[in-house]
Image (tube, rainbow, N blue to C red):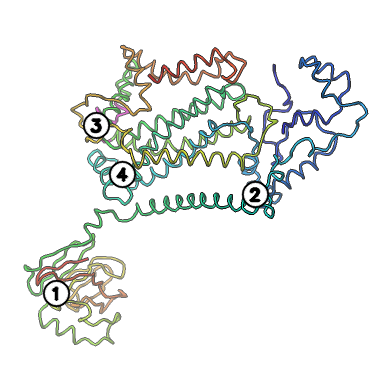
Amino acid sequence: MNAFRLANRLVPRTMGAMRSSSRILGTTNAIRHLSVPATQTTPAPLDQLGSVDHEYESTRVDRVAEPDRRAFTYLMLSSVQFVYASAARLLVVKLVASMAPSAEVLALAFGEFDLSALEVGKTIMVDWRGKPIYIRRRSAAEIEKESQVQLDHLRDQEADSDRTIKPEFLVVVGICPHLGCVPLPNAGDFGGFFCPCHGSHYDVSGRIRMGPAPLNLEVPPYKFISDTTVLIG
Amino acid sequence: LSLTFMNSSHNRITSSPLINLPSGIVRPSFSLSSLLLQLQISLKSLLPVNLPRLNKAYFFALIDSHIIHYPTPITLTYAWSFGSLAGICLVIQMVSGIFLSMHYAPNVDLAFSSVEYIMRDIKNGWLIRYVHANGASMFFIVVYSHICRGLYYGSYMEPREWLWVSGVILFFLMMGTAFTGYVLPWGQMSFWGATVITSMVTVIPVVGSAIVEWLWGGYTIKNPTLNRFFVIHFLLPFFIAGFTLIHLALLHKVGSNSPIGSDTGVDDVPFYPYYASKDLFALSCFLVFFATFVFYFPNVLNHPDNCIPADPFETPRHVVPEWYFLAYYAILRGIPHKTGGIIAMFGSIAVLFLIPFINSSEIRNTTYRPIFKFFFGYSLLISLF
């Protein structure tokens, strides 16, 4: 509803004002039809001349009288809102997933290492997922000694048989569980590993025996695909 | 015929956050507050919040007066949706760009392969890359339509001259962003397009070649150039975002133009829900159009030569910029004189700044200017062929 026309019809105009305004607008004849009689002093109610809420209430569907119309509108709206919601979900999922490890990183998730050249008593270090892995070939005497250790003496109680698949080969992650330094192999008071950063001593099974480390050296997931080839990951 | 019913200033956002009734009109003789109360109560049903409570806090009153109850002419067509669409395009580009820059390497040895790495190895990397590349083209389509609307309906005329100027500044920032962004994949077109455009600086007498070597960070376009172009490309969108706020502030000072051209504000409706829903529908249509390119024709707007790694010793046969720069490139090549061509090219964009100030027509809308309308359509037709 044009508020200008609305306001014009509300205010009673004098004859003089009408004539001067009609001169400006150039509609002398037309204005007589719109003129308000001099006897009318109260302005007409606003809602009879137009709609203050842009006819929202008057065009509103009556829920009781026409239930199907409202149901149809709700059906349309809810289905479109479902599409919007799924678009938003898709956006978030796709963008968040893009930050996950890429195919290149996942391809390097497994490492195959040949241990045929490893001599008894020696330790090698390999790179798996960017982490140092120690693989030690143990002698029968060392395996026997580790199995004799009483679990009560250990901070992190794990039997040696639980930490190896083939007792001859020890595969552990070479990162000290204390604060992340790389321990030195074939060192320390227990013949295993020694972390120079804060003095953690590990035995030949990679278990913490002395020092501040809270846990044993981590055993990564691995399996032997042949007698001398190990697949880590 | 000059309509001067708005006796008060052109400031549409007054201290009252409610509907801005035309103030210059002869007022009815009964109380206005009862009318406003009636208005509030009936409009309350449109929002699921307690309206009077909403306007007590300054922050909500600000949002309310600019986005919810902001008075917008009832006659706006879908040509007016391009503005909000451009804002959304900016957001799309920024989000996709940020996720791309997590995996991109701005080094001449790694750039091209890092883009291929994104396309192949990163999860959904192909999607993000295609969204960003085609999003740039979509951004330009939307902005060109927005400019066309402004030219046709005379939205640059009084009192919106500075609004238009802020828009042209935004356009320049956008072109800078697009140019630096296209260099980043380090393909043949990237490299040679960058060479051609940055070499234009040599047209400056005396200091030209010194400036271009400073710009390049070397004697040719190499790693330093790529590094700084990456930084510029990352930085400019934030300037665009800031200028967008200025652009909106200048718009809200005087209000939107309309297809009818009258500025009286007598036929205004609240922005929410009418234009919020209209813009949302326009966005849906735009996204369908966008998705068609991203999912079905992702490389049709791209040049195949950009899939060849950059070679500083071999220029491709047909060095062309992306489609949205072709008009200016044609102007550059159309003038067989180096300085003349460059001046003509930049001049053709800079002339946009002058339009509000050289305008001599008292009629705003092209619909009511038959001679101008003919030439407007004619030049549009010419520019397409």
Q: Is residue B87 magenta?
A: no
Q: Quadrant of the C terminus of chain B?
A: top left
Q: Earlier in the sequence, mark 4 or mark 2?
A: 2
Secondary structure of the residue carrying tag 4 is loop
Q: Quadrant of residue A188?
A: bottom left
Tell me which segment is drawn in magenta.
Answer: B213-223
Q: Quadrant of residue B345?
A: top left
Q: Which residue is mark 1?
A: A169
Where residue B47 is drawn, which disc sits there? 2
Q: Position of residue B76 (x, y in %)?
A: 59, 31
Q: Which residue is mark 3?
A: B305
Residues beneath discs 3 and 4 located on the same chain:
yes
Q: Position of residue A146 (x, y in %)?
A: 18, 83
Q: Nearer the viewer, mark 4 or mark 2?
A: 2
Q: Nearer the viewer, mark 2 or mark 1?
A: 2
Label 2 crowd (10 A; few <14 / some 14-19 / many >=20): few
Query: What's the amino acid at mark 2?
Result: Leu
Give the vertical position of A133 relative to B367 (above or below). below
Distance CA(mark 3)–CA(mark 4): 20 Å
Label 4 crowd (10 A; few <14 / some 14-19 / many >=20): many
Q: Nearer the viewer, residue A77 or B165?
A: A77
Give the vertical position of A48 relative to A210 (above or below). above
- Report whether B352 appears left or right of B190: right
Q: Is residue B217 magenta?
A: yes
Distance CA(mark 4)–CA(mark 2): 44 Å
Would you say the residues marked 4 and 2 are in contact, meaning their CB atoms lie under 8 Å apart? no
Q: Which residue is mark 4?
A: B104
